[in-house]
Image (spheres, rainbow, N blue to C red):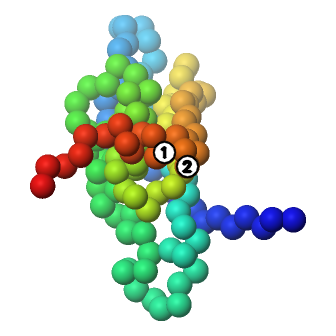
């Protein structure tokens, strides 16, 4: 039987400062938008022989970019912000696959949460990566 190894970076319950949705005067506006992100990376970036940032995936710049995207203006839909987050993740060659979940709360009368999720396997991540404009040299 073939043994498969995998490694992930997990970000959970990150509150985003964002403006999503169009609401009428009697609609419930969410108080919070929360991001959960799971990034598949190479096992070689977790099982390391020597301690040091040069041997691992540095996720801090990606989190800074996600914060920037979230605050980048008004979004009508959660789906658009998720699309932009997926593109930001795909810009990092170390990321092989991803799961993105964005939820808002409350939904009605101070309760409930409603979310949208996206899962991209390695082929879909590479396809998204290849659709991105290349930086000019």
- How crowded pointer 1 is (Cα within 10 Å; few <14, some 14-19, many 20+) is rated as many
User: Whole-percent x and y of residue 112?
Assistant: 60, 28
Q: Which of 103 and 106 is in front in this view?
A: 103
Q: Residue under circle 2?
A: 122
Total number of numbered labels?
2
Asked whether residue 6 is in view, the answer is yes
Q: Quadrant of residue 110?
A: top right
Q: Is mark 1 on a helix, strand or loop?
A: helix
Asked whether residue 15 is in view, the answer is no
Report the residue at 37% width, 42% height from top: 130
Report the residue at 45% width, 50% height from top: 14
Q: Are marks 1 and 2 in contact (CB under 8 Å)?
A: yes
Report the residue at 44% width, 62% height from top: 94
Q: Residue under circle 1?
A: 125
Please, which residue is most extreme toward the bottom here?
50
Please, which residue is most extreme toward the right here?
1
Considering only vertical position in the picture, is 30 above or below 10? above
Q: Which of 120 and 10 is in front in this view?
A: 120
- How crowded pointer 2 is (Cα within 10 Å; few <14, some 14-19, many 20+) is rated as some
* C-alpha gap between disc 1 and disc 2: 5 Å
Q: Quadrant of the C terminus?
A: bottom left
Q: In this view, does 69 lie to the left or right of 89?
A: left
Q: What element carries label 2?
A: helix
Q: Is residue 98 left or right of residue 14?
A: right
Report the residue at 58% width, 71% height from top: 43
Q: Nearer the viewer, residue 102 or 46?
A: 46
User: Whole-percent x and y of residue 91?
Assistant: 34, 51
User: Whole-percent x and y of residue 8?
Assistant: 57, 62
Q: Quadrant of the N terminus?
A: bottom right
């Amino acid at each position: 039987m073939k043994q498969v190894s995998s490694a992930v970076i997990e970000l959970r319950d990150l509150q985003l400062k964002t403006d999503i949705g169009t609401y009428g005067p009697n609609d419930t506006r969410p108080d919070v938008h929360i991001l959960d992100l799971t990034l598949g990376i190479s096992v070689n970036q977790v099982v390391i022989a020597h301690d040091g940032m040069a041997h691992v995936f540095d996720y801090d710049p990606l989190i800074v970019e996600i914060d920037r995207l979230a605050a980048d203006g008004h979004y009508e839909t959660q789906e658009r912000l998720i699309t932009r987050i997926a593109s930001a993740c795909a810009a990092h060659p170390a990321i092989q696959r991803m799961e993105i979940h964005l939820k808002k709360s409350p939904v009605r009368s101070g309760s409930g949460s409603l979310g949208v999720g996206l899962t991209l396997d390695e082929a879909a991540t590479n396809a998204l990566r290849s659709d991105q404009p290349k930086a000019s040299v």
